[in-house]
Amino acid sequence: MTQAKRALPARRRRGVWILVVVPLVLLVAATFILLGLRRQAEVGTLPIPLESAESTSPAATVSPPNTTSRDSEAKTAKAKTVKAAAALKGCEAKVRAADQVMAAGEDGMRHWAEHVQAQTDALAGKITVGKMEDIFDRTMKAGDEDEQRYTAAVKAYRQRDGSCRAVGGASAQVAKQLTRCAGRGRAQRAVLVAAGDGMADWTKHLADMRRSKHGKVHNPQKKWLKTWRAAPPHINAYGKAADRFSAPRC
């Protein structure tokens, strides 16, 4: 007959219970601790493990933008833009004023050249004296308007202070337009100088004719022939300068 198993002593049973329960309690406690740490990390009360030091370091905190510096830079850029726009406006006005001088000079020099050529053709027998006198009368009448228009255009041109020099801070478009206008301004110079010389001869002769009508010129025919002989160089120089003129619009 099999012998019945004996019950374990009470002390031994307590030891077995401790070996089972204590690890279980420790495991449960550890689980709750880890869950608590994770929850705190999620809500931001603790640093997240393994996160780089840069993200938690006070030195790595992003500084607020320097709005004062940005405002200053924006104002400086705006000031340069306004200055460039004003420079272009003055440049264009100066070049266009020169165009007006050239236009007035063109009309005046055409009439002056006709006036001188009429004398040349009459002396060469190409036209009659009567035809010469008709040309003289027509060009003299136009000459009064030539003088007024040319004088006013020159005055307006000289009063313009614009310059087509490059301006710092100008946009590409403004810089390009300044360059175009500067090129036209340079090309205008030769025509303006030549027109100035020729128109000085024409306006002087017109003044002589007015004085002659009042008997203030001694031997007006002799004086005219002297003026006629001296006129071709300036007329020819103007014709060459005008023919060579080529420049972009401004």
Image (spheres, rainbow, N blue to C red):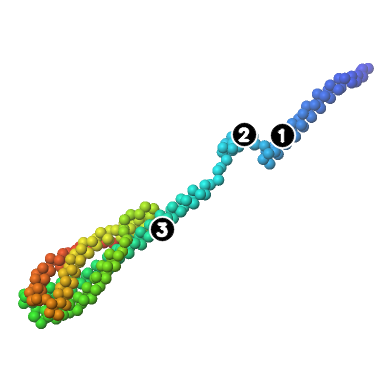
| Residue lying at 22% horizontally and 73% vertically, measured from the top left | 147
Q: Of discs 3 and 2, which sits in the foreground?
A: 3
From the top left corner, tell me how far across and down residue 234 is, in percent: 15, 66
Cα–Cα span, label 3 and label 2:
54 Å
Amino acid found under the numbered disc labelled 1: Leu
Question: Which residue is denoted by mark 1 in the rendering?
Answer: 34
Secondary element type, mark 2: loop
| Residue lying at 56% horizontally and 38% vertically, measured from the top left | 60
From the top left corner, tell me how far across and down residue 229 is, in percent: 9, 69
| Residue lying at 18% horizontally and 68% vertically, measured from the top left | 200
Disc with the residue nearer the chain's start (3 vs 2) = 2
Q: Which of 250/35 is in front?
A: 250
Q: Quadrant of the C terminus?
A: bottom left
Circle on res. 50: 2
Q: Which of 143/15 is in front?
A: 143
Q: Where on the picture, by quarter, is residue 78?
A: bottom left
Question: Which residue is denoted by mark 3 in the rendering?
Answer: 82
Q: Quadrant of the N terminus?
A: top right
| Residue lying at 25% horizontally and 67% vertically, measured from the top left | 154
Cα–Cα span, label 1 and label 3:
65 Å
Contact flag, marks 1 and 2 (Cβ < 8 Å): no
Q: Is residue 33 left or right of residue 116?
A: right
Q: Visible in this render: residue 219?
A: yes
Q: Of discs 1 and 3, which sits in the foreground?
A: 3
Q: Visible in this render: residue 121?
A: no
Q: Which of 164/217 is in front?
A: 217
Q: Is residue 27 left or right of residue 232?
A: right
Secondary element type, mark 3: helix
